[in-house]
Image: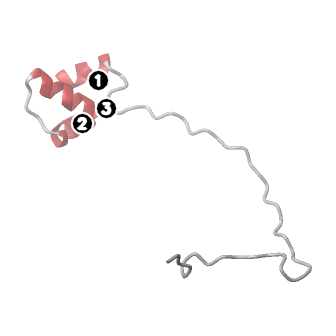
Amino acid sequence: MRIREMAQTRVHYGYRMICVLLNREGWKVGEDLVYRLYREEGLRLRRRPALRRAVVHRRGRFKPTGPNQVWAMDFVFDQTL
């Protein structure tokens, strides 16, 4: 009952924060128990909707027309001593 009351008054708190508040009030409960009871009551945080990103079309790769126009570096085998 106390978990449900806390979840209704503090809407943005999840089971971990409710567990901390219960321990401060004197209830000696662990996160696993609070999580199980939290889920059984059907309580859960509402997730924010994902932001959609603008679609960016890829540009084609650069086609070299002569030597020394494209360089690459292999970082796996390069070392500085």
**Foreground residue among 63 and 79:** 79
Report helix, strand or loop for mark 1: helix
Q: Return the residue at label 1.
A: 7
Q: Return the residue at label 2.
A: 40
What residue sits 37% from the left and 25% below the top? 12
Residue extending furthest toward the front: 81
- Of discs 3 and 1, which sits in the foreground? 3
Location of residue 46 (image quadrant): top left
The kind of residue on which mark 3 rests is: Gly
Residue 26 screen position, x and y as percent: 7, 24
The kind of residue on which mark 2 rests is: Glu
Q: Earlier in the sequence, mark 3 or mark 1?
A: 1
- Of discs 2 and 3, which sits in the foreground? 3
Position of 25 with respect to 35 (left or right) is: left
Residue 62 in sight in this render: yes
Residue 80 screen position, x and y as percent: 53, 76
Position of 14 with respect to 79 (left or right) is: left
C-alpha separation, residue under disc 2 versus residue under disc 3: 14 Å
Q: Return the residue at label 3.
A: 14
Note whether 51 is above or below 77 in the view shown.
above
Location of residue 36 (image quadrant): top left
Note whether 73 is above or below 38 in the view shown.
below
Report helix, strand or loop for mark 2: helix
